[in-house]
Image: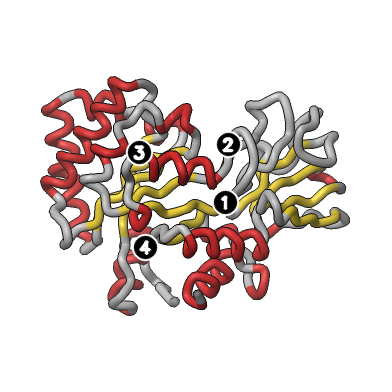
Amino acid sequence: MPVDGTEGCLRAFVQLKQQYSQMRVILSVGGGGKGSENFAAVAHSRSRLETFARTARALVDQYGLDGIDVDWEHPADSKQGKDYVRLLAKLREVLPAPRYVLATCLPAGQWALRNIDLSAAQKYLDMLNLMAYDFAGPWGPETGHHAQLYGTPTSGYTAVDYVLMQGVPPRKVILGIPVYGRSFLGSTGPGQRYTGTGGEEGVFDYSDLPRPGAQEMHDPQAVAAACVGADGGFVTYDIPATVKQKAEFVTSSKLGGLFYWHICSDARGPRSLIETGYNTLHEM
């Protein structure tokens, strides 16, 4: 999809949208860490909320986009959870359906989801992007699969089950796939102590996995994969086989689809996670 000579990501996507009429482009606002630090203050203030909603609509219309994705990571308590719902309500007011798409990204752990009235929130949303990854990382004392579909204490399945029980329609739930792996040095599998992390801040792009000299493994019961050895130690990530299983789960559960973070880290050819997910969803 050529966008040669185009400056800026938004303009590049606008050009792609002109080439592919069925393509929808949604602007994601926020993100992890500092990307979300202003949401609480904005959502709690009526004047700031009005300004945010008005300027969001203006930006969407300026570039001919299809909507907004609210990536607030994440409301820290029930008070912020109420403000989060107010934020969605105001955005829906200025971005009415079906002309505009309103989506959100949320962590897949109940420690975050329980702060939000999901039944109320879903009334304003077209899509809930469930970030079913980062279940394990350098913040914890032990290794673990970071994107398992099944297992304890947190998994893609338990997250999906929770949001459905809260009243979110299955068709609005989009299951997230990580296009990166998390590294644990000095370990060979989940549930172990580790000595540090490899890669860049404990992360390897999926396109750089498995690590040279490492052995790749697939756990079909947990729907998880990893490579062991070389410079990454135990690196947990998704592979085409696990993405295929997750796509089959999405279809059988009547969910809305899959999303990926992020596309630039994908591999080409038969190891492509995005291509595997697309093909599996459209074959079933």
Q: Label 1, on which residue?
A: 178
Q: Is residue 274 above or below residue 133?
A: below
Q: Quadrant of residue 209?
A: bottom right
Sooner in the amino-acid sequence: mark 3 or mark 2 = 2
Which label belongs to residue 154? 2
Which label belongs to residue 7? 4
- Residue under the point 17% across and 47% down: 92
Question: Whole-Å distance between the Cαs marked 2 and 4?
Answer: 41 Å
Q: Which structural element holds mark 4?
A: loop
Q: Nearer the viewer, mark 1 or mark 2?
A: 2
Q: Which structural element holds mark 2?
A: loop
- The type of residue carrying mark 1 is Pro
- Residue under the point 60% across and 49% down: 149
Which label belongs to residue 166? 3
Instruction: Judge left or right: residue 68 versus residue 282.
Output: left
- The type of residue carrying mark 4 is Glu
